[in-house]
Image: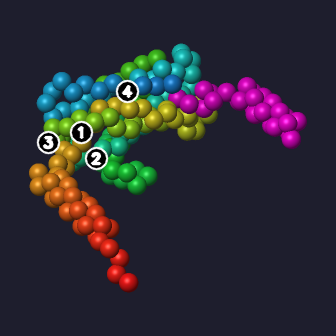
Amino acid sequence: MQRICGSLLLISALTVTLHPLSASVLAANITANTSVPDVWTYTIFNNQTAGSPDYVDQFTIAISAPITVIATPAGWSDSIGLVDGVMSIQWWSNGDSSDLAPGASLGGFSIRSNTTTSVMGNADLNSWDHSAEDPGPNSVTIQVATPSQNAQVPEPWTGSTVGLSLLVASFWLRKRSSRPMAK
């Protein structure tokens, strides 16, 4: 049994060594600027090394609040809707000449929301391989500030009602358990 486990570990180690995970992940990041009230502005960075064929061509953020797009960089388009079943905003490049090159950054992705809460949300960047003319690697999920609906605060009496109900139930059970059993 030890021999089989050792062999499986060796095969796994060789597989990871021969096929590094980093080769299939887009090196990229996103920053968010929330200094203007009710506005979230994003800058995307393509951190691929110079000469890489992988250009960023899509930017998606999961959103849990009503929003309006107020800015989209030239050469890019946007859409708000369901992406993999999650309400999202998606920006995409209109062609190779607008894709974000390795080592470059692009700002001006802005949304407005009348919510006052900002939470960390999931964002993703996708790339296009300009050499192969095929989809390139995607980024890992990146956490960025996003607008969020205000958390629903329970009515003040809710906690008191539940507490009082538990107290009454405990007294009732205690009184019932202290009664002599009828025969």
Q: Is residue 156 magenta?
A: no
Which is closer to the viewer, label 4 or label 1? 1
Residue type (three-letter) at the residue carrying disc 4: Ile
Magenta extent = 1-26
Which badge, 3 or 2, is on the more N-terminal residue?
Answer: 2
Q: Are marks 2 and 1 in contact (CB under 8 Å)?
A: yes
Disc 1 from disc 3: Cα separation: 9 Å
Determine the secondary structure under disc 2: loop
Position of residue 145 measured from the top left corner of the image (x, y, whole percent): 29, 32
Residue indicated by mark 4: 30
Which badge, 3 or 4, is on the more N-terminal residue?
Answer: 4
In the image, taking residue 82 as reference, residue 139 lies left or right, namely right
64, 182: nearer the viewer? 182
Is residue 85 in view? yes
- Dominant secondary structure (helix, strand or loop) of the stretch shown in magenta: helix
Determine the secondary structure under disc 4: strand
Q: Residues within 10 Å of mark 4 (few under 14, many from 20)?
A: many
Position of residue 105 measured from the top left corner of the image (x, y, whole percent): 38, 21
Which badge, 4 or 1, is on the more N-terminal residue?
Answer: 4
